[in-house]
Image: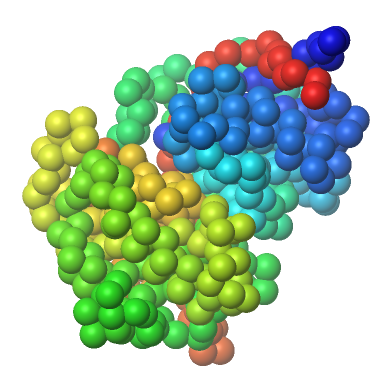
């Protein structure tokens, strides 16, 4: 019996924010994978190592977590006034599934740097020394992201003293601006309400009613109060991810919220839309010790947030979820705004399992509808390895 050989594909392995992913230029992919479809999905799953019933990604580039099972495809943009198109795929770990329904805010940072590394930007746009403003078209959700990437001697400056909780070592700061981050129709609140009362099974929430803020900014997100579901808001990963019943409960609540937001047509459909929406629980400031042993004091933050991604509590915070947090905090009356102290605000500092993060957002009321013009946060990125990945040609 003969077996087909492996194929070799140019690729770059990058960290962006608190995530890692495999980056490709569109033209470097096999022809069959240069367009959306089964061939592309099969290729990305195989190189990541999914589906893996062992949940380890031993035979692939994935890291067996939602933060490290990601792929990015980029090319020169065809959208006016943009430099690059950025397409993001979230690869499921134990199921044969690639979710293209949303963006990764953390890897958006790396997308800006990769655009320069991969010569996808007109050289005249890259300064010899200074800040290169990379205008990114986020193709999954049809939104503009501006990455301000430091450049030294004509190349991306990757080393520096910017520290990001959730990342072990300091690096150079990249500032991200998410422009008009609500969905394509500009509807921040899909139901029209700042707070909804979700009807839920009583075995999930006592009383059968759960208050939630359902927001679509950065990424569709369901925010609930930690106390309403029996948590303090200071929990670390193991408290949630080590509790199988808790994970089933969160997924059930996420499906109910997704249905209310109009993202799915039935609760069963949530299984095929794992990346979005996210679900997060919020609480007022409290003292706690981060997963790295750092003491977070009540006075350090405005609020606490714990967010789940792909069915597990995230070790830090998803970048797009941070945009949702910043937007919701800026709008008086949302659950996020209320736990942060209420009133109008343009920035919020929140505690997550790894530490803290500050994000700014500008929201305004126009003709009775809330609009968000931009959200800004700082992250970092660097190349971990570059060369080629090999994938069995089966």
- Outermost front residue: 1
Q: Nearer the viewer, residue 112 or 32?
A: 32
- Which residue lies at the image location 64% right of the left edge and 45% below the top edge? 97
- Outermost bottom residue: 368
Q: Position of residue 236 (x, y in %)?
A: 22, 44
Q: Position of residue 58 (x, y in %)?
A: 51, 20
- Which residue lies at the image location 51% right of the left edge and 83% below the top edge? 191
- Left or right of 16 in this view: 206: left
- Left or right of 146 in this view: 165: left
Q: Where is residue 358 in the image (x, y as percent from the top left)?
A: 33, 49
Q: Which of 289 and 58 is in front in this view?
A: 58
Q: Which of 392 and 194 is in front in this view?
A: 392
- Outermost right residue: 31
- Which residue lies at the image location 29% right of the left edge and 57% below the top edge? 246
Residue 11 to residue 201: above or below: above
Is residue 130 shown to the viewer in this render?
A: no
Q: Nearer the viewer, residue 74 or 376?
A: 74
Q: Quadrant of residue 130?
A: top right
Q: In which quarter of the image is residue 302?
A: bottom left
- Which residue lies at the image location 83% right of the left edge and 51% below the top edge? 80
Residue 177 to residue 222: above or below: above
- Left or right of 133 in this view: 314: left
Q: Position of residue 95 (x, y in %)?
A: 58, 43
Is residue 71 shown to the viewer in this render?
A: yes
Q: In which quarter of the image is the N terminus?
A: top right
């Amino acid at each position: 019996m003969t077996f087909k050989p492996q194929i070799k594909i140019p690729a770059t392995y990058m960290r962006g924010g608190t995530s890692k992913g495999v980056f490709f230029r569109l033209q470097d992919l096999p022809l069959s994978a240069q367009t959306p479809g089964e061939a592309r999905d099969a290729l990305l799953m195989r190189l990541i190592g999914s589906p893996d019933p062992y949940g380890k990604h031993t035979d692939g580039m994935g890291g067996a977590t939602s933060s490290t099972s990601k792929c990015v495809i980029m090319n020169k943009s065809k959208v006016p006034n943009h430099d690059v198109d950025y397409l993001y795929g979230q690869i499921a770990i134990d199921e044969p599934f690639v979710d293209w329904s949303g963006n990764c805010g953390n890897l958006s940072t790396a997308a800006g740097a990769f655009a320069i590394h991969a010569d996808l930007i007109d050289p005249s746009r890259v300064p010899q020394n200074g800040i290169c403003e990379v205008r990114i078209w986020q193709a999954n959700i049809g939104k503009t992201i501006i990455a301000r990437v430091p450049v030294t001697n004509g190349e991306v400056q990757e080393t520096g003293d910017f520290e990001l909780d959730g990342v072990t070592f300091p690096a150079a700061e990249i500032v991200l601006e998410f422009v008009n981050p609500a969905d394509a129709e500009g509807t921040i609140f899909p139901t029209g309400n700042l707070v909804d009362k979700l009807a839920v099974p009583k075995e999930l929430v006592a009383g059968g009613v759960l208050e939630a803020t359902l927001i679509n900014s950065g990424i569709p997100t369901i925010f609930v109060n930690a106390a309403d579901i029996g948590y303090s808001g200071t929990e670390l990963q193991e408290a949630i991810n080590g509790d199988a019943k808790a994970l089933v409960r969160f997924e059930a609540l996420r499906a109910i919220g997704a249905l209310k937001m109009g993202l799915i047509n039935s609760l069963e459909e949530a299984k095929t839309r794992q990346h979005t929406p996210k679900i997060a629980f919020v609480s007022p400031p409290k003292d706690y010790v981060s997963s790295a042993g750092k003491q977070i004091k009540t006075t350090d933050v405005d609020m606490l947030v714990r967010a789940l991604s792909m069915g597990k509590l995230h070790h830090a915070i998803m970048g797009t979820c941070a945009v949702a947090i910043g937007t919701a905090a800026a709008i008086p009356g949302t659950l996020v705004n209320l736990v942060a102290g209420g009133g109008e605000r343009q920035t919020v500092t929140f505690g997550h399992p790894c530490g803290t993060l500050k994000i700014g957002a500008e929201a305004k009321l126009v003709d009775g509808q809330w609009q968000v013009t931009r959200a800004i946060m700082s992250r970092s990125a660097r190349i971990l390895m570059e060369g080629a990945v090999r994938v069995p040609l089966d």
